[in-house]
Image: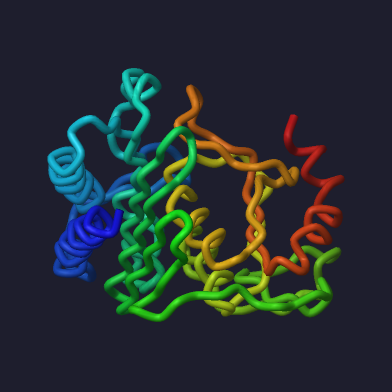
Amino acid sequence: MAPLLDAVVEIAAAAGQMALARWRTDFRRWEKEPGSPVCEVDLDADRMLHARLSALLPEAGWLSEETADAPDRLARRHVWVVDPIDGTRDYIRGREGWAISVALIEDGQPVIAVLDAPARRERWSATAGRGAWRNGVRLAAGDRTALAGARVPADVLPRTDRDFVVVAKPNSIALRMAMVAADEADLVATLRWGNEWDIAAAVLIGAEAGAGVSDALGAPLAFNKRVPQAFGVVVAAPGIHDAAIERLAERAAALAG
């Protein structure tokens, strides 16, 4: 698996360098729908990743935010799940909180993950059963056991969660999740339906660093589903994951529908 990871790291880095070269320049941007920005660099990165990852593992299916979904992926044991630029809003605004996100799914679970965040000079990777790494340093989630005081990447907190501590929040959900793996945050939680490509790589990075990882209801996450979405994600220091799920349970149940 190591040679395959090395190849994925190289491919994601190439896409990252291409995107970095065009960051803070003049490029075309628009909204796919209200509140969902996209730019031409998203599409160029998607084409580059699709071509190179498909050549690397021709038998694998493909699921990406910027490619029309093809149902043939459901019959594949292996599927690339990709967000060519996770955190497009930060990319467009010239902020650093964006990353190239690539995961290889095997039988519904991520087995290889790479986040390339060149504006932050960060390269994250993980292989199932072999740990998670950032810039060559092995990652370990924190040992917090008290929910109160947990560090959360956020702009503002709901009144019921004012006992948390706000830390810097990149726009990329994958990078926020990876912060828990690096013990730079203790908890990241979303309470809405989200897409598999947003979280697939970071789920493996968090899990391999020892974090507790689940959907918003506390259930295990699976990938390459017919409708490629999950109801939220909770990534937490292992000692507070259950407590976080308990605190969020009523809100999550009301929103899950």
Residue 74's x, y, as percent? 40, 22
Residue 112's x, y, as percent? 37, 52
Residue drawn at x 45%, y 31% is 224
Residue drawn at x 77%, y 44% is 252
Q: On screen, 33 above or below 205?
A: above
Describe the colour scheme in one phrase: rainbow
For residue 70, side relative to residue 128 (left or right): left
Q: How many marks?
A: 0
Residue drawn at x 46%, y 66% is 131
Residue 164: quarter of image: bottom right
- Decide if residue 79 is in sight here: yes
Q: On screen, 187 above or below 46?
A: below
Foreground: 146 or 151?
A: 146
- Decide if residue 172 is in sight here: no
For residue 153, side relative to residue 249 (left or right): left
- Quadrant, the C terminus: top right
Foreground: 151 or 9?
A: 9
Q: On screen, 22 above or below 35?
A: below
Residue 16's x, y, as percent? 22, 63
For residue 234, side relative to residue 58 (left or right): right
Foreground: 120 or 178?
A: 178
Residue 125's x, y, as percent? 37, 64
Residue drawn at x 62%, y 64% is 211
